[in-house]
Amino acid sequence: MINKKIISEIYRKLDGELPENLSRELEEYFAVHPEAGQQFKEREKLKILIEGEKEQIIDIDLKKEILNRINMEAYTQKEKKPEIKVVRSIWIRPAFRLGFVFVLGVFVGFMIFAFFKADFRGAKEATPEMKGTLYNSSSFDDMKTADVLQYDSPLAKAICNVRYSTKIVEIRVELSSLYPVRSTLEFDFNNFEVLNVQNVSVNDQTTAMAASNFIQFNNVGDNKFIIQLYNKNKLPHYIEFKIYQNDTPIYQNSVQVNKE
Amino acid sequence: MIEKDDNELVYEVTKGNISSFEVLVDRYQKTIFNMVFKMVGDVETAKDITQDVFVTAFEKMGGFNFKYRFFSWVYRIAINKTLNNLRSKEPTERLKGVETNIAEDLTGQSQERNRKILQSGLRSLQADYRILLLLKYYCGLSYNEIAEAMNITEKKVKSRLFIAREQMHDIMIGKGYFEND
């Protein structure tokens, strides 16, 4: 029985890995133990036989076939990733579809709500009682001009600009006097109702006072007022504009609104 | 003209140069085909496996690790594909066919007879050991190169190769190869 170590050394010698001195020692061992030498010869013969297979080469060229297959697979790969597939896969997801329907529902609901709400409000505003009562900064320009009264003297200067619409009369008064003067706008309380007396530019020595049938200004210096009256009917009416100094009238004139 | 290094050609392939891949195919197709043929014993199967090996190599070349050598990498692909092919076949059927061939061939000339005995012996050997013998003696790879190709340690290559050679020796004794010595 040959030692496994000797077999291992035989293979090392056959592979050319055994150093020269050990190789010589192994040959000496073979001389003493011919059965070991026989084992070496057998394995050497087998090695030569297997290595001889190198010469038995089948000459073959598969390059064309290989390249054809590579081109075809590259083409197949390109076809595998259409971008539309991604879009489709999102759309078929229930969560996406529910979300889309929810958002669409909210949007449609909002549109319906906004449409009907606007319509109801419009219906309320269109009632005849309310017509002409809305007022904003551009209303004065849209009103009909009744008259513009002007007074200019060394004692006082005054401008009284009167305009009217269906329901509103607006009077813009500018007063200027070095000494105290009193000015009044007088009207019939059956025809007008005071809505608003606004101090546009008024100093602290000047006062404005409203009653049911007149508005009075105690003026010193340069002041501006806006007065709004509610026009109770569509008949022609007169508004008296007067200026007094020491209770003596120095100017008096009237303006007609609701002109025919 | 100076021949380009394998890894240099691999780099060019990854940059889209197909002609560099053709050079690699030219360089290794014969060795790989013949090694596979000696493993499977059938020309058509060996052709299919060789084509598969290079197609797979081309597809995976983008992930090639340049710290390895191309030939050991492509050998590894070939080894895996060959072993998979052999495992998918019925072993008894394969061995039966081999024995029939020997009986017919024993009457032939001495050299041809030895070759047939060797081939039959190789096919009787377990596939993992057979491939080791082919890589060592037929392909002429070093222990280190075999270790790289089979993705095992060099120590394991030596121990497995020892077993493979001993089993082959025993098979050849059984087939009467050493009887006249």
Image: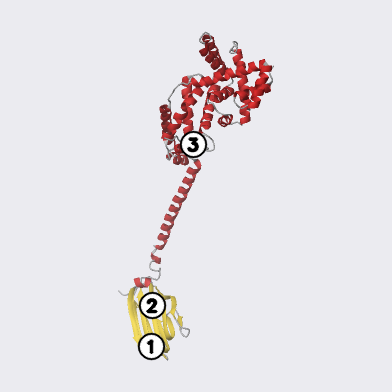
Residue A243 drawn at (x, y percent):
39, 86
Residue type at numbered disc 2: Ile
Residue type at numbered disc 1: Ala
Task: Tell me which corner region of the image, top left, top right, bottom left or bottom right, holds residue B166.
Answer: top right
Tag count in the figure? 3
In the figure, is residue B102 to the left or right of A214? right
Task: Determine which residue is flagged by label 3.
Answer: B7
- In this view, the residue in front, A46 or B32, is A46
Residue type at numbered disc 3: Asn
In the figure, is residue A198 to the left or right of A145? right
Task: Determine which residue is flagged by label 2.
Answer: A171
User: Residue drawn 65% across and 23% down?
Assistant: A24
Q: CB atoms at circles 1 and 2 under 8 Å apart?
A: no
Task: Determine which residue is flagged by label 1.
Answer: A156
In the figure, is residue A217 to the left or right of A142? right
The answer for how far apart the CA atoms under marks 2 and 3 are is 99 Å
In the figure, is residue A39 to the left or right of A111? right
The N terminus of chain A, quarter of image: top right
Same chain shared by disc 1 and disc 3: no
Mark 3, secondary structure of its residue: helix
